[in-house]
Image (cartoon, grey):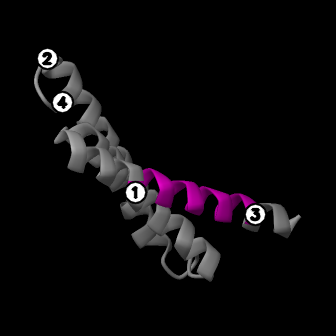
């Protein structure tokens, strides 16, 4: 079932690219940081998916753990920022 994994990874990569582009677009229009932070996080996840698609996942395993962790930490930071300043422009 290798084709399912590649299809899923390719779909995840494309969706990450869409989310990055939407995050940048919304930030440019509204000057709100939350969409940009989400876009950055999904950009990091997209790097991980691209490495898998290109066959670098095993060689870059340690780096991909760091990249994915940074993605999750970016989402956590964005949500804490929103929670601590709910009425501020975030």
The residue at which mark 3 appears reads as: 7
The N terminus - image quarter: bottom right
Q: Position of residue 18 (x, y in %)?
A: 49, 55
Residue at position x 34%, y 48% in the image: 23
Whether pointer 4 and pointer 1 mark residues with C-beta atoms closer than 8 Å, the reply is no
Q: Is label 1 or label 2 in front?
A: 1
Q: What residue lies at 18% left-to-right and 18% top-to-bottom? A: 86
The circle drawn on residue 21 is 1
| Dot label at residue 72 | none
Sequence-first tag of 3 and 4: 3
Question: Mark 1 to mark 2: distance in Å?
Answer: 25 Å
Quarter of the image with the C terminus in it: top left
Residue 42 in the image, given as x and y percentages of width and height: 42, 53
Report helix, strand or loop for mark 3.
helix
Give the mark nearer the N terminus: 3 vs 1: 3
Are the residues flagged by discs 3 and 2 in contact, CB closer than 8 Å? no
Q: Are marks 4 and 2 in contact (CB under 8 Å)?
A: no
1 or 2: tag closer to the N-terminus: 1
Q: Which residue is mark 4?
A: 81
């Amino acid at each position: 079932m290798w084709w399912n994994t590649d299809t899923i990874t390719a779909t995840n990569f494309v969706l990450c690219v869409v989310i990055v582009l939407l995050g940048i677009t919304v930030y440019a229009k509204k000057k709100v940081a939350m969409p940009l932070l989400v876009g950055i996080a999904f950009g990091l996840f997209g790097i991980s998916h691209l490495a898998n698609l290109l066959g670098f996942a095993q060689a870059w395993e340690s780096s991909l753990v760091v990249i994915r962790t940074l993605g999750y930490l970016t989402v956590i930071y964005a949500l804490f920022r929103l929670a601590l300043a709910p009425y501020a422009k975030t």
